[in-house]
Amino acid sequence: DQQVKQNSPSLSVQEGRISILNCDYTNSMFDYFLWYKKYPAEGPTFLISISSIKDKNEDGRFTVFLNKSAKHLSLHIVPSQPGDSAVYFCAARAWGSNYQLIWGAGTKLIIKP
Amino acid sequence: KAGVTQTPRYLIKTRGQQVTLSCSPISGHRSVSWYQQTPGQGLQFLFEYFSETQRNKGNFPGRFSGRQFSNSRSEMNVSTLELGDSALYLCASTGRGVRLADQETQYFGPGTRLLVL
């Protein structure tokens, strides 16, 4: 069973516009969420995270929103830049899980010039 | 600080063979996790080692095994390779710093691309 779902395999956005990547989860014990970005031939790199006690976290152009009642989180990138073209993974940790992260399948973001 | 390193970067094997992959974590990190990435499947968790002990294990068959040494370097072994084992194998290390983000953030190596023929 997929506890973390990224239902859009790919997303295409015009440069300068907002990119919104979505992630849904099923486990109500998840208490910490992370977004990673991955370029081809490289390992994923940490982007931004959010604790379940918050509903928003910002870091420059990147903002993550958490809606606990809907079990949904989203990553907003404003404005989108060509270098943002990559695969984005969301991951979640359940409290008491010994720090194990559960990962989504990823969404490929393509920024069009 | 040097990042996570993985060797080899690329590997070609045939069915039935075995393979050993190596991962050196960031200096000071004691946790090493291994993942398998295949197209459309995201990152599938294999196992995590912390202070030479396997702390978590994913749902992979016993052909997949690992170990961690006292210097935190880790190896992953796959025996009796199958065609379906062709994938990118990623290793990640985690620190346990003061900030929550440091405790959870995994730093990934570039991966080992394994092709089984």
Image: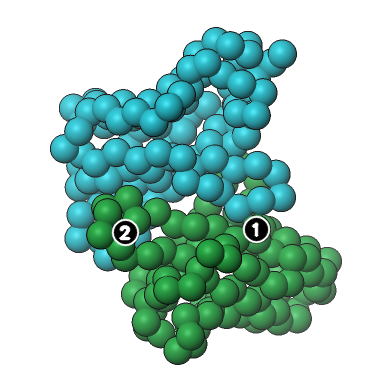
Chain colours: A cyan, B green
> Taking B68 as reference, is B82 left or right?
right
- Residue farthest along the bottom direction in this orientation: B70
Q: A38 or B2, which lies in front? A: B2
Q: Position of residue B71 (x, y in %)?
A: 48, 85
Q: Of the residues under marks 2 and 1, which one precedes in the sequence?
A: 2
The amino acid type of the residue labelled 2 equals Gln
Residue A15 sits in which quadrant? top right
Q: Is residue B78 visible?
A: no
Counting from the top left corner in percent of width and height, residue A46 is at 47, 46
Residue A68: x and y in percent read: 21, 31
Looking at the picture, how far across and down is residue A66, in whole percent? 27, 29
Q: Please give the count of numbered marks on the rendered protein.
A: 2
Mark 1 closeness class: few <14, some 14–19, many ≥20 residues within 10 Å: many
Residue picked out by circle 2: B103
Is A55 above or below relative to B72? above
Quadrant for residue B23, please give it: bottom right
Q: Residues within 10 Å of mark 2 (few under 14, many from 20)?
A: few
The kind of secondary structure element at disc 1 is loop
